[in-house]
Amino acid sequence: MGGAVSAGEDNDELIDNLKEAQYIRTERVEQAFRAVDRADYYLEEFKENAYKDLAWKHGNIHLSAPCIYSEVMEALDLQPGLSFLNLGSGTGYLSSMVGLILGPFGVNHGVELHSDVIEYAKQKLDFFIKTSDSFDKFDFCEPSFVTGNCLEISPDCSQYDRVYCGAGVQKEHEAYMKRLLKVGGILVMPLEEKLTKITRTGPSAWETKKILAVSFAPLIQPCHSESGKSRLVRLRLAGPRSAEEEDELPAPATGSSPQAEDSEIEFWAPPTQDDLLPTTFGKTLFPEIFTTSIFQLYLSHFSICKTGIRRKLSKCMQGESWLGCLGFQVESRGGRLLIQSLLS
């Protein structure tokens, strides 16, 4: 699937072609596509094809064509602070672009069937955080990935503002997918050979729009483990569920029992002193910092990824204030450190 636009010499030229063909129509989506180089998600020996409007598959690793991702990003109508669930998250390419739009208050979860692809996605995410200039230009919502079958999501999962499924959904699983969505949310998925946008307009009301004809490999049906139990995927957002969510908890498509084995996603938690300062250098230099209420408030409200913090802190070795990198102004008065947040 693909080939709708001309190939580019680099990532920017590919995006220019997608814009000219009207696959990319909004500035927010354009910025996300330009910020994440598609070639970085290819194996080295296949990078020559990265800027062609074609899908790529090698073993379990798969990338959809750029024109498909463009239509998906536009259809999702992403906004800062939303929660996003990527079913069949693959290389993490789409999740990383989404994370640039969601920002620090968003939620960015992915479920992927193949454990080797999860490891590949984590490597690519780490490379993006450590090397990309875009990481410093955006407030990034770091994706979290878990291994599992998206048809075996635990009945007590939370609902999301935006959901994308990257595999062909059989008609019998349409209702299951819809129940993952909050009222007002948007679900984008290949349904009966059409990329389809479904908006939940009320508890039992939906609007459906067919976007374009596509050809996706179908969802893989769950298989039980040797113990005979299915492996539930637990996805939980912070905070209590609403009454509507409690009523709409999706039963696994396989009818899994409560005794099923679990596969839990690793959620972000406020970094500890050891996460922030792996060496004793900062611990002895600024011990007061970890007892200040404003610093704890900052950490509890901002989704700062650990790798990103270490990257910012590394700048102190180049003569920059690491507190300044995190958005604080520090003054010394009467032998005490006064810390003021520079955040608006």
Image (tube, grey):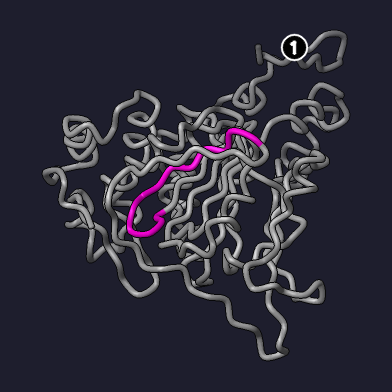
Label 1 crowd bin: few (<14), some (14–19), many (20+), radius 10 Å: few
Q: Residue at x 72, y 74 (%)?
A: 256
- Range drawn in magenta: 190-202
Figure quadrant of the C terminus: top right
Above or below, 3 relative to 330? below
Where residue 67 appears, x then y in whole percent?
26, 45
- Identified by mark 1, the residue type is Glu
Left or right for 242, reference 41: right
Q: Is residue 87 above or below residue 228?
A: above
Please tell me which residue lies in front, 344 or 97. 97
Q: Residue at x 88, y 29 (%)?
A: 291
Q: Residue at x 77, y 16 (%)?
A: 339
Give residue 312's quadrant in the image: top right
Q: How many tags in the picture?
A: 1
Could you say which is closer to the camera, residue 59 or residue 202? 202
Looking at the picture, how far across and down is residue 140, in whole percent?
Answer: 54, 35
Q: Quadrant of the N terminus?
A: bottom left
Left or right: 147 with respect to 89?
right
Q: Which residue is mark 1?
A: 331
Residue at 13% across, 46% down: 7
Residue 333 lies left or right of residue 33; in this view the side is right
Furthest residue toward top: 333
Q: Nearer the viewer, residue 31 or 246?
A: 246
